[in-house]
Amino acid sequence: MSFDLSVWALHDGATPEDVRSAVQRCREGQHGDRYPDPRVVGFYRALTASYPDRPAHQGTPWEVSPLHAAADHVALNLVPTCPDQVLLDIERLAGEYDLMLFDPQDGSVYPPPSRVTR
């Protein structure tokens, strides 16, 4: 069973409920027509530079690849044996790109570390 996370680029002041609502819209297949948020693009490029998702191959932390990337988020399905460093890198990059983390295992939403320290 994979360990899943997603990172979200929502408006300033977005609440955990805003993130959960965006997740629900995604699950329902509602992806609005908009340009990709530069924060999502930057996060995806930085993350996949260290942990490529294309082509799919063994030895990566991804249970599902390529990663699901949309205009406002990236969904990450990680292998159960994913090294802690990968999770730390995801959290660090989410902070660098001002993205909120969503943990579908329990519905938790975490603001980026950069917001916590402001």
Image: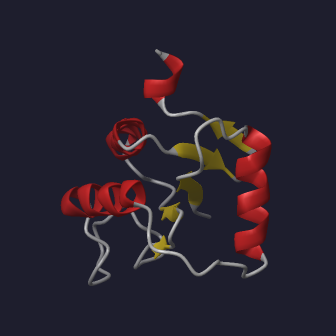
State which quadrant residue 41 falls in. bottom left
In the picture, the quarter occupied by the N terminus is bottom right
Task: Name the residue rendered at 37%, 46% in the picture.
Answer: 83
Say if residue 105 shows up in the picture: no
Image location (x, y in percent) of residue 97? 37, 44
Asked if residue 6 lies left or right of residue 108, the reply is: left
Q: How is the image coloured?
A: secondary structure
Task: Name the residue rendered at 46%, 27% in the picture.
Answer: 113
Task: Name the residue rendered at 28%, 80% in the picture.
Answer: 54
Q: Residue furthest left?
A: 49
Say if residue 96 shows up in the picture: yes
State which quadrant residue 44 falls in. bottom left
Asked if residue 50 lies left or right of residue 67, the reply is: left
Task: Name the residue rendered at 32%, 73% in the picture.
Answer: 53
Asked if residue 78 lies left or right of residue 61, the reply is: right
- Between 69 and 56, the one lying in front of the other is 69
- Between 61 and 92, the one lying in front of the other is 92
In the image, residue 112 sits, relative to residue 67, either above or below, namely: above
Image location (x, y in percent) of residue 45? 26, 63
Image location (x, y in percent) of residue 19? 70, 50
Asked if residue 3 lies left or right of residue 16, the reply is: left
Image location (x, y in percent) of residue 49? 19, 61
Query: How many marks are shown on the rendered structure?
Result: 0
